[in-house]
Structure formats: C-alpha cells, structure tokens
Image: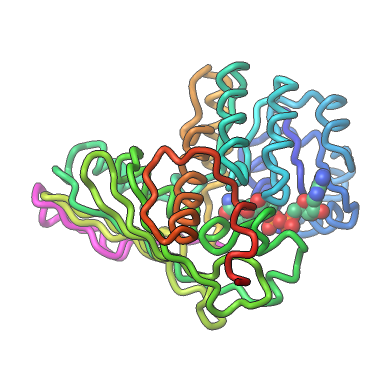
Amino acid sequence: MRYALIGCGRIAPSHIKAARDNGFAIAAVCDIRGDHIDELFARCGLPPEEAASIRRYADYREMVRAEKPDLVSIALPSLLHAEAALFVIGEGVNVIIEKPIAMSMAEADAIVAAADRTGVTVSACHQNRFNQAVQEMRAALEGGRFGKLSHGAVTVRWSRGQAYYQQADWRGKWASDGGALMNQCIHGIDLLRWMCGDELVSVYGVTRRALHGYIQAEDVGTAVLTFANGVIATVEGTVNLADEDLEEHLSLFGENGSVKLGGTSANAIDYWHFKDAPEESKDGFHEKTLNVYGNGHTSLFRDVADAITEHRPPYVDARAGRRALETVLAIYQSSFTGKPVTLPLGEVASRDFEGFFDK
Ligand SMILES: NC(=O)c1ccc[n+]([C@@H]2O[C@H](COP(=O)([O-])OP(=O)(O)OC[C@H]3O[C@@H](n4cnc5c(N)ncnc54)[C@H](O)[C@@H]3O)[C@@H](O)[C@H]2O)c1
C-alpha cells in the first residue's frame, strides 16, 4: 500500500504510526510548513534513512498527482478537509479524512456523493470505534444481548486551555474548527449515534462559551437526542475541566443489559452486566493508550487497506462521518434557535453560528 499524508501537525504522528504498524510504504508527506515535517519525523523517531526516503511537498495537489499513492490520509485543519478530500477522490485515490470530515452539510454531502460516484474508498477517522471496549459493547449490541434499548449517554470531560488554542490560528473558530463538541466530543457523539441506531429524528441542544472567552465557539454543550427507534440519549461535552482530562464515558442501557464504558476516551469498561450471563464480568478492563487519541488509528488504517483490496466498504465510511457532523451541527442549530431541531438537517454550516456568543 503506497501511502501519503496531508498535514503534519499534532495528530500526524498517529497517522505515521498507523501506516508503519500496517507495513504501508510511506511515499510522501505534505505540509505548507517544512519545519512541521521535520518535527513530525523527529516525534515519530524515524530512522534517518527512512525519513530521507519520504518525499516532501508543500502542495498536496502536486503530491497526489506526482506520487499517485494508493491511499492518502488528510490531517489538515478541519476547514480544509472537504476541499482536499474532494480533490483526492477526484484523482481516484482512496482517502481517510480526519474528523470532522467537513464543516458544513453541503460539503459532507459532496464527499458522500463523490465516494458513491467514483467507487473510491473514503473513510472518516472515527478511530475510537476500534477501541477494544467499544468493540465489546458493539458485539453485545449486534448479538442482540441488550434486548430492547432504553437509552444511551456520552460524557466527554476534558481540559483544553489557552496554550492549546494558541497552537494554531484555526482552533476554536466557528468556520475552521467549531468548539468542544465539534472537535473534542465528536468521537463520543459518533459512538453514541452508532450504538443508538443511527436514525436520529430530533435534537435539543444547549451550548455555552463558559470559560474560554478567547475562542469563538462553545466550550461546553449538552443535548438530548431522540432516535427513530424510540431510543433517547444525552450528550455532555466540555473542555472546561481544570488542568486535566477526566473521562469519556459511553453508556448503553437495554431491557437485558447495562454497559458503561470509561477511561479518558471510552477505552475501559466500568460496568458490564447482562441478564443472559450475570456471572460474566468485564468490569475493570482497561486498554492502555499513550494519549486520548487511543490506539484506533492503526486498526482503522488496517481496515481501510483491507476494504480497498477486498472491494468492500470501510468499517467507518463517509456516511458515518456525515452523521457525526450532522449531529454536532444539529446541536449548534438547536442551541442557536432555542428550539429542538428535526432531522434531516438541511444546509447548515458551522460558520452560520459566527458571533453567537458575542451578542
Ligand atoms: N482523530 C483524532 O483523534 C484527532 C485528534 C486530533 C486532531 N484531529 C483532527 O485532525 C485535524 C488536524 O488537527 P491537528 O491538531 O493535527 O492540527 P495542526 O494544526 O496541529 O496540524 C495541521 C497541519 O496542517 C498544515 N497545513 C495547514 N494548511 C495546509 C495546506 N493548505 N496544505 C498542507 N498543509 C497544511 C499545518 O501547517 C499543520 O502542520 C483536525 O481536523 C482535527 O480535528 C483528530
């Protein structure tokens, strides 16, 4: 698998690690900042001869056309995802797009349509779906062990301070990033929607910029989701914790089973109980991770490579990325209007909420 990376910033080491773990040939990387490429190679501990063999570009269009890789991953600032993804897909190259896959429904729709039209493999980088604890919950759900579902919940209680937002100009702004829900909590929101049945019918959201006056978008948000199958769910997401990330919890409750995942990124099992096997205990399971990004990039990259060779859809496809984006934008829209929002959402973009907290 000849692989190339677009965007060599904070998350890029997880992409390079995933490519190397899977034995991909890293043909090239691209960043407008050459020093970021140097830093990436240093952070990944690439041996000098391996680093020297990777071609470097400042223009991703030039890179994709010259290198013709089998697979590209996009780790650009969120505002640039859709434009880059549409270019890569247009060149007939398979692509993994970091979350959120776009900043507007129109862009997400264009990505889904381009994937369908071309048959190119397009995956949204919601890598936490591959967390071992999440996979356990999913297997129980698909095995029918929960019975009729009652409700679900996600809580993402993390800490991001001024130094984090000052790292790059795009962070915390409506048009280019969004706030805590769009950036940090979208993984948990993706998991919640996936577990509760995907078909979301209404969203009531309340968001605030409570403690981070220097960003544009929300630093805390809550929401109630209602699904077509009758399941209800709650979201609580924030970057307002003092100094340290506390937890990312995901709970799912049904007539025959109760599961609560924990850890800092839904990488642990806090509570596991099913009527069909009350003695079965998974409580205390904890997948070790180096950071809140977890180990899922390696599994997601493996799945995408297999999807390409097996001519099947990837485990996390473009529609999954679109659904996660739609959920966050629906929460924004509801908070903005003060009313529940009925889905499908229509043409909403994160930039529509510019100035919301400045009134
Ligand atoms: N999946 C995850 O867990 C996870 C974690 C962190 C970030 N992300 C997502 O990954 C994306 C990148 O986040 P980050 O924290 O690494 O950001 P970052 O700002 O650290 O890195 C972005 C990089 O893109 C480069 N860049 C900007 N414009 C470019 C252009 N036109 N062409 C080429 N390079 C360009 C920048 O120089 C920078 O090196 C974001 O969308 C973010 O939401 C995902």
Q: Residue at x 19, y 56 (%)?
A: 258
The answer to whether residue 46 is seen in the rendering is no
Q: Residue at x 42, y 37 (%)?
A: 344
- In the picture, measured across the screen, residue 156 lies left or right of residue 291, that is left
Q: Residue at x 74, y 29 (%)?
A: 87
**Nearest to the observer: residue 23 or residue 189:** 189
Judge whether 219 appears above or below 95 on screen: below
- Would residue 270 be counted in the magenta stretch? yes
**Nearest to the observer: residue 81 or residue 14:** 81
Residue furthest to the bottom in view is 242
Image quadrant holding the C terminus, namely bottom right
Q: How many marks?
A: 0
Judge whether 326 appears above or below 89 on screen: below
**Nearest to the observer: residue 86 or residue 42:** 86
Q: Considering the whole magenta stretch, tell me its main secondary structure.
A: loop
- Would residue 1 be counted in the magenta stretch? no
- In the picture, measured across the screen, residue 63 lies left or right of residue 115, that is right
Judge whether 263 appears above or below 68 on screen: below
Q: Which residues are magenta?
A: 269-290
- In the picture, measured across the screen, residue 100 lies left or right of residue 198, that is right
Give percent across and percent down for residue 55: 88, 38
